[in-house]
Image: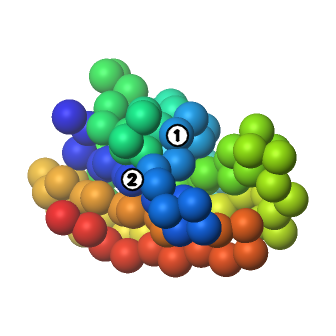
Amino acid sequence: MSPITTHVLDTTHGRPATGVFVRLERLRQGGADLLGEGRTDADGRLRDLLHADATLSIGPHRLTFDTAAYFEALGVQAFYPTVQITFMVHDPSQHLHVPLLLSPYGYSTYRGS
């Protein structure tokens, strides 16, 4: 399992958000480095986000969720085309779980376990 995982729940429909494309980047002065990407599974989870050759380091990271494509596939008009969550990695040896609760007109996130 990746040291960073995510879980997307569609709170409007009360079910996991399947097939959401997610990118993980490490932020640095003047840009970002891609560390991994993938799609949520049938349970809305992405457990293997970090590429096999990538390593975590201390500092800011960002998850970007392609919410427009997810809602378009459902035939739902949404307000936010992407959701970006920026967070700090303080200890690269710890597992970080970053869930996203999603609806067409809002979202929420928290540090999970």
Q: Residue shown at 81%/55% (left/top)?
A: 76
Q: Residue shown at 47%/38% (left/top)?
A: 40
- Sooner in the amino-acid sequence: mark 2 or mark 1: 2
Q: Where does the image place residue 16, in percent across and percent down from the top left?
A: 45, 50
Q: Residue shown at 18%/54% (left/top)?
A: 95
Kindly tell me whether residue 57 is visible in this rendering: yes
Question: Which secondary structure, mark 1?
Answer: loop
Q: Where does the image place residue 77, in percent across and percent down from the top left?
A: 86, 59
Residue 106 versus residue 48 in the image, above or below: below
Kindly tell me whether residue 37 is visible in this rendering: no
| Residue assigned mark 2 | 7
Of 55 and 107, nearer the camera is 107
Residue lying furthest top? 53
| Residue assigned mark 1 | 18
Assess disc 1: are there few (<14), some (14-19) or many (≥20) residues with their C-alpha within 10 Å of its C-alpha: some
Q: Where does the image place residue 79, in percent across and percent down from the top left?
A: 83, 69
The Cα–Cα distance between marks 2 and 1, rounded to whole angstroms, is: 10 Å
Residue 77 versus residue 18 in the image, above or below: below
Question: Which secondary structure, mark 2?
Answer: strand
79 left or right, relative to 108:
right
Q: Quadrant of the N terminus?
A: top left
Q: Amino acid at mark 1?
A: Thr
